[in-house]
C-alpha cells in the first residue's frame, strides 16, 4: 500500500532514550534533513541527535498537559508524533492475560499515545509493535501481546494518519527484564513452548539473557526464513530506522523489520480466537 505522507518539519518523539527512539532520530536525520526533532525523556540527560529535549517527562496522567505546556505555540504544528514507551506484565502466555493486566499494560504502552494523538492532532502518528503472534512469543509475551494487537487495530483504522514499525527481537532493557521473568517462570510452567525453552536452556550452558536472545532469534528464523532469500540476522537499531524510513516514504501502514528482512501489512496476522477478548475500540 502506498500512502501519502506529510513533509516532516517538526517531529516529537516520546520516550526517545531507548533503541526505538534513537533509531527514529537516525531515520529522521537521514530522510528529513530539515526536520526539527523534539525528544522527551524522564531523565535530565539530553537525547543525542535531538534539537531539543523535554526533561522529566514521565508516562502518567499529566503527560499530555506537560508536553503541551513545553510545546507552547508549537502545539498545532507537530507533523510527526512517535511514541515508543512499552511496559506490561510479560513472562506468561498471552492467552492467560486478564482484564486488569491488559488495562495496566495499555495505560502505559497505548492509551497515552491515543491521548497525545487526540490532543496534538499530528499529521502522522507512529508507534512500535512486535512479532507477538509467533509461537514462541505467544508463550511468554503476556499482556503486551494484547496491547500490540490493539495498536495494530488502531493503526489499520486510519492508515492515512497512523503507522507502526513492527520489529524483530533486539537487545533492550525490556528484553533483559523479560528474560529474567522467564527464568523464574520456567521453574513451574506447564506450557509446552516454555517447557521446550526450559529444556534447551538447561543444556545450553549460557546465561539466561544470551540464551533468550539466541532462542528468540532461532524461532524467528524458523517461522519467517522461508519467505526471504537473505540470511537471517538479529534485528539492530539500523533496522528499526529502516522501518521508519519506509513509512516516511509511503509504505505501510505496518512495516515489519527483522534483521535485513522488510515487509508491509495492511491487515492483522492470523491470530488465535482468544485475541478477541481485548483490543482497540474507536
Image (spheres, rainbow, N blue to C red):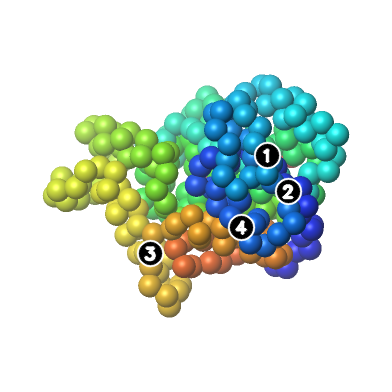
* Quarter the C terminus occupies: top right
Residue at left offset 73%, top offset 35%: 116
Q: Is residue 4 visible?
A: yes
Residue position for label 2: 36
Disc assigned to residue 27 = 4
In 3D space, how far apart are the residues under numbered discs 3 and 4 (Cα atoms)?
20 Å
Looking at the image, tell me whether mark 1 or mark 2 is earlier in sequence order: 2
Tag count in the figure? 4
In 3D space, how far apart are the residues under numbered discs 1 and 3 (Cα atoms)?
34 Å
In 3D space, how far apart are the residues under numbered discs 1 and 2 (Cα atoms)?
8 Å
In 3D space, how far apart are the residues under numbered discs 2 and 4 (Cα atoms)?
13 Å
Looking at the image, tell me whether mark 2 or mark 4 is earlier in sequence order: 4
| Marks 2 and 3 close (CB-CB < 8 Å) | no
Decide: few, some or many residues near mark 2? Use Cα within 10 Å; few <14, some 14-19, many ≥20: some
Q: Secondary structure at mark 2?
A: strand
Residue position for label 3: 233
| Marks 3 and 4 close (CB-CB < 8 Å) | no
Disc assigned to residue 169 = none
Residue position for label 1: 52
Amino acid at each position: 500500500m502506498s500512502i501519502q505522507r506529510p513533509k516532516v518539519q517538526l517531529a516529537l518523539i516520546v520516550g526517545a532514550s531507548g533503541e526505538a527512539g534513537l533509531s527514529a532520530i537516525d531515520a529522521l536525520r537521514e530522510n528529513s534533513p530539515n526536520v526539527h526533532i523534539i525528544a522527551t525523556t524522564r531523565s535530565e540527560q539530553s537525547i543525542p541527535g535531538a534539537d531539543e529535549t523535554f526533561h522529566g517527562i514521565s508516562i502518567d496522567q499529566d503527560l499530555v498537559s506537560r508536553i503541551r505546556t513545553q510545546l507552547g505555540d508549537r502545539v498545532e504544528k507537530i507533523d510527526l508524533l512517535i511514541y515508543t514507551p512499552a511496559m506490561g506484565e510479560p513472562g506468561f502466555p498471552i492467552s492467560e492475560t486478564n482484564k486488569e493486566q491488559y488495562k495496566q499494560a495499555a495505560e502505559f504502552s497505548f492509551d497515552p499515545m491515543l491521548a497525545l494523538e487526540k490532543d496534538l492532532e499530528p499529521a502522522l502518528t507512529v508507534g512500535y509493535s512486535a512479532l507477538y503472534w509467533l509461537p514462541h512469543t505467544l508463550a511468554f509475551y503476556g499482556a503486551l501481546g494484547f496491547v500490540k494487537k490493539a495498536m495494530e487495530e488502531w493503526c489499520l483504522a486510519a492508515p492515512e494518519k497512523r503507522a507502526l514499525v513492527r520489529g524483530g527481537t533486539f537487545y533492550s532493557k525490556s528484553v533483559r527484564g523479560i528474560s529474567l521473568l522467564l527464568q523464574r517462570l520456567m521453574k513451574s510452567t506447564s506450557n509446552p513452548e516454555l517447557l521446550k525453552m526450559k529444556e534447551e536452556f538447561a543444556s545450553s550452558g549460557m546465561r539466561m539473557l544470551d540464551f533468550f536472545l539466541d532462542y528468540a532469534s532461532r524461532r524467528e528464523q524458523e517461522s519467517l526464513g522461508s519467505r526471504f532469500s537473505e540470511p537471517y540476522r538479529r534485528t539492530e537499531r539500523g533496522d528499526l530506522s529502516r522501518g521508519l524510513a519506509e513509512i516516511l516514504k509511503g509504505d505501510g501502514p505496518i512495516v515489519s523489520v527483522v534483521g535485513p528482512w522488510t515487509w508491509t501489512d495492511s491487515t492483522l496476522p492470523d491470530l488465535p480466537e482468544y485475541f478477541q477478548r481485548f483490543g482497540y475500540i474507536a
